Amino acid sequence: MCASTGSAKPTVLIENERVKVTEWRFKQRGDHTGWHRHAYDYIVVPLFDGALEINLGNGETMEAAMQNGVPYFKEIGIEHDVINANNFECAFVEIELLEARR
C-alpha cells in the first residue's frame, strides 16, 4: 500500500487472494503511514476515539473524526498520508478488498 515509508507500524493479520487485513499502529502524535495510493477498495475500522489528520497533497489537509469500532469505506485510487492527530497511541484495522469489482 505505501509508496513512501512512514513511522506508523503496519502488521498484516490476514492475506489471501480475496482480502488483506492490516493493523496500522501509531505510537505517538505525528506518526504517519507514508504517502500512498490505494490500489483496491478498502474498509477502515478505528480502534480508538479521536482524530486522524489526512494529508491530501499540495498542502491540503483535513481532520477525520474516528469512533472506536465504527467502520468506513473508501474506493480505489485514494492518495494520501494518514497522520496521528492525537496525544496518545492509536490504531486502526484496514481491510483491502483484493478481488475485482463485478
Image (tube, rainbow, N blue to C red):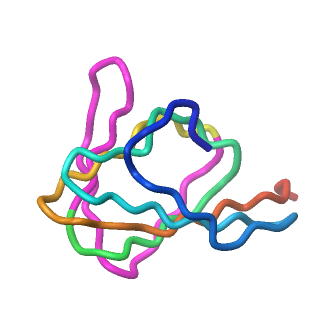
Image coordinates of residue 41 in percent, x first then y, are 66, 54
Judged left or right of residue 10, residue 65 is left
Q: Give the residue at the far bottom of this rendering.
A: 69
Counting from the top left corner in percent of width and height, residue 102 is at 87, 58
47 is higher (above) or lower (below) than 7:
below
Name which quarter of the figure residue 3 lies in.
Answer: top right
Q: Nearer the viewer, residue 24 or 63?
A: 24
At 63% across and 72% down in the image, what residue appears?
13
**Residue 32, how many percent across, how many down?**
35, 44
Left or right of residue 15, residue 48 in this image: left
Q: Which secondary structure is most common in the magenta stretch?
A: strand
Q: Position of residue 90 (x, y in %)?
A: 29, 66
Front residue of 10/43: it is 10
Quadrant housing residue 81: top left
User: Can residue 63 be found in the magenta stretch?
Assistant: yes
Image quarter where the N terminus lies is top right
Q: Residue at x 17, y 65 (%)?
A: 88
Q: Which residues are magenta?
A: 51-76
Q: Residue at x 72, y 61 (%)?
A: 97
Horizontal placement of 63 versus 24: left or right? left
